[in-house]
Amino acid sequence: MGAEKKGTEEIEYKTSLLPPDEQAIALAARLLQQDEVIGLPTETVYGLAANALSSKAAKKIFTAKGRPQDNPLIAHISRMEMLPMVAAQVTREVMLLADAFWPGPLTIVLPRTEEVAPEVSAGLATVGVRMPAHPVARAVIQAAGFPLAAPSANRSGSPSPTTAQHVLQDMKGKIPVILDGGACQVGVESTVLSMVQEPVILRPGYVTAEEIARVLGRQVHTAGAVTRPLEQQEAPQSPGMKYRHYAPEAEVYIVDGKLEDFTAYLQSRKGENIYALCFAGEEMKMPVPCVSYGKEEDSASQAAELFAALRRLDELGAKVVYARMPSKEGVGLAVYNRLLRAAAFRVVK
Ligand code: TXA
Ligand code: MG
């Protein structure tokens, strides 16, 4: 963990990967209290966490990730008593949502308090808040004693990390500690729901619009930019919509068609470093080398495996990847949203 000064600002850390026992959690809390950044597991993806109430700490997250300054971070809390530290206004509807979905993969965007470091909100008057379900994430927040700002622990633009090894690949030398909690169960990031005005989903996730609508007893819209690129003059409802996301080195294309169409298309495209991103059980039918991402009829399994599959394709040296089209129903919409961005919106009919 010894850190060496490199130039004036950037520090080269000796990054430790630790099992999340009591000792490691205490160490993580100490580091966080000293405004350091650590890697930690959540049920969705791994996070790059630091004190959400400290500008110095929050700035270090942006540096480690190479994240654009105008893209805000989510504040993570471990108990409801922490909510007023970050949210200035908690309505009855917000309490209904918290009761129904917290701890869990739902981020609620709310008016923020003055206590939240301005960097966390990237200058906005709002803050995204979530209470994660992962016991390690909650234990670390609890031990630190303050809310943690935590974006996904990948380098900005690359696929989100769903294992501690992925975090190490991206963050080695940039942070002192990564807590290894194994593979993330959900595998795609939380649903981001704005409750600042009418409820609107800014990023789909494991919690669906239908589930939220049922709890609120009213309609919940989903931002258009979830399933298409931003238009030229369109102001993004969430800064994250502007940026390139989840992209592996390889050029990815989604192929919209049945399995037979997919394999026929691949036959015509066979070549060096051409790969298929298929569903589990289809491997034997692929005319090119392939990696699978979950079962066709099981969106949750696709969510759990997609990011690891994209990283695997890069390790294999894939140059072009043709991907099977996921269902857009339920959790499938989150899978489609991530894959569409990984593919830079390239869809072949
Ligand atoms: O599951 C998750 O949410 C993970 C884990 C670590 O909790 N975190 C995560 O953070 O995915 P990040 O920073 O990779 O994505 C946060 C997204 C971005 O698209 C950002 O623009 C949006 O949430 N966001 C955050 N605060 C916002 C705000 N105040 N208003 C609008 N969008 C916001
Ligand atoms: Mg991210």
Image (cartoon, rainbow, N blue to C red):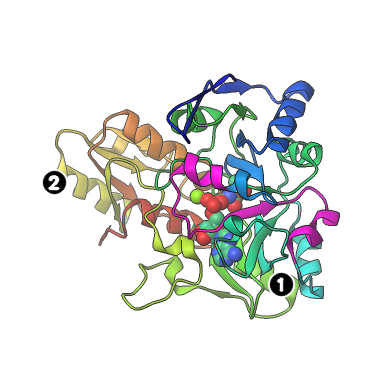
Q: Amino acid at mark 2?
A: Ser
Q: Pick whichever of labels 2 and 1 is earlier in the sequence.
A: 1
* 62 drawn magenta: yes
Q: Nearer the viewer, residue 329 or 179?
A: 179
Q: Nearer the viewer, residue 115 or 296?
A: 115
Q: Which residues are magenta?
A: 59-87
Between the C-alphas of marks 2 and 1, the distance is 46 Å
Outermost right residue: 81
Q: Nearer the viewer, residue 234 or 4?
A: 4
- The residue at which mark 1 appears reads as 214
Looking at the rendered image, the quarter that the C terminus falls into is: bottom left
Left/right placement of residue 10 relative to residue 49 reads left
In this view, 130 is above or below 159: below
What residue do we see at 72% from left, 35% from top? 136
Residue 216 position within the rendered picture, expressed as x and y whole percent measured from the top left: 73, 75
**Quarter of the view holding residue 178:** top right
Left/right placement of residue 118 relative to residue 25 reads left
- The residue at which mark 2 appears reads as 268
